[in-house]
Amino acid sequence: MAVSDKQLIRWLAHTDPRVRSASLDLLSNSYTSDPEILTSVVSAWDHYGIEEAFSDFPLISHLAISPEQMPLALSRASQFSQGRKITDRVCRCAGKLAEAISVERASSFAPYLDELKVLKASSKIFFRVPIEVMIQRAEALSREPSSLEMDFEDGTIGDYAIALESLWERGLANRWIREGIESWEEPTPGKLAVTALELVSRHPIRGYEEQLLALVDRDEASIADLATIALVRGRNSLTQSLIADRFASMSRSGQLRSLDIIRRMRLPESAKLIRFLLPQGSDASVQNGARVAEFMLFDFEFLEEWLEAFLLMEDASVQRLVYSIPISHPLALEEVPVDWPRVKQLLKTRLGSGFDLE
């Protein structure tokens, strides 16, 4: 089984800063929504210091903030930004917290709009917080569904986005999401197509895996990337089954994105699927991508295959993955302690004898 969310969350408190940072990065790339992540991040800040706890915290792609955690996130964002330049690393952490709040459900941040307005005005670091749009999203929660649906007739693309999100929060958007996602099959998809794709890329919404996987294989990178994110967020085993069926017929870019989806979802059967797909790769770069994906799953149930993937991948790929490799130490101690000396030796054959793994 791939390295689990529970293991990674536990290692957010690890004594090795490289393990802490790599664990947070893997959780972020999987769009994990466990509220324990923020709790553990704050605990690490308090224990190790904001600048030392996580080397690249401002750069993570996702941080879930539950409704109950909004006051905590707002308080820390305010604290971290006071009296600091926007280039200050602590201040940038404040910006990431506020940005994470802004992309949560409107119902989660709506009760805290006054605090958000004060925060927005307090520092230039919060330039990414679209407070006017957030106010509109919050206000839409009190509108009647029939009023929101009228926006699909003559509204702007911004109106579409707010209306669709508000309907989704109430469980009334399925018809509109499906219509939007399916309309990507038409020659000229409209505003609802764009809005629906953006919504499913921002929240874990299931039920559109077949249509989204077709978009993953599109030539337009902006569309394919949103579909990729949407499938990762869903973390649905059905996605893996669909990839297994379609992989051989996909384009090179579609195959690479599919491998990325499997890697980032980290589901129980992911490593087996990667090995099944590897010989179907359209060229050497796709096959190398499969080895990278298997390595990043850290599935020590298949330790020999994991080591083989590492030893056979391209040198450039090894250099890109150096940041994650320290995870292998606590993982091995938990799952294959007897094998750790051999694992360490084989890793160092490519990392160099001076690379510290403990």
Image (tube, rainbow, N blue to C red):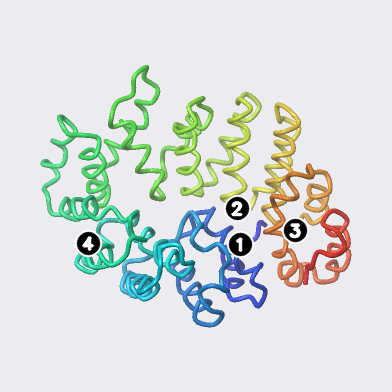
The amino acid type of the residue labelled 2 equals Arg
Write the residue at 68% across / 46% down: 293
Give the CA distance from mark 1 to mark 4.
32 Å
* Residue labelled with disc 4: 110
Q: Position of residue 155 (x, y in %)?
A: 17, 34
Q: Which residue is mark 1?
A: 4
Element marked by disc 2: loop
Neighbor class of circle 2 (other Cα within 10 Å; few <14, some 14-19, many 20+) is: many
Q: Secondary structure at mark 1?
A: loop
Residue 301 is tagged as 3
Which label lies toward us, 3 or 1?
1
Looking at the image, which is closer to me, 154 or 276? 154
Quick check: 239 left or right of 272? left
Marks 2 & 4, CB-CB < 8 Å contact: no
Query: Which residue corresponds to the image point at 11% horizontal and 41% vertical from the top-left?
Result: 146
Viewer-closest of 298 and 162: 162
- Disc 3/disc 1 C-alpha distance (Å): 12 Å
Of the numbered discs 1 and 4, the one sitting upstream in the chain is 1
Q: Which disc number belongs to residue 266?
A: 2
**Precedes in sequence: disc 2 or disc 1:** 1
Position of residue 354 relative to residue 189, above or below, is below
Tell me the CA gap for discs 2 and 3: 14 Å
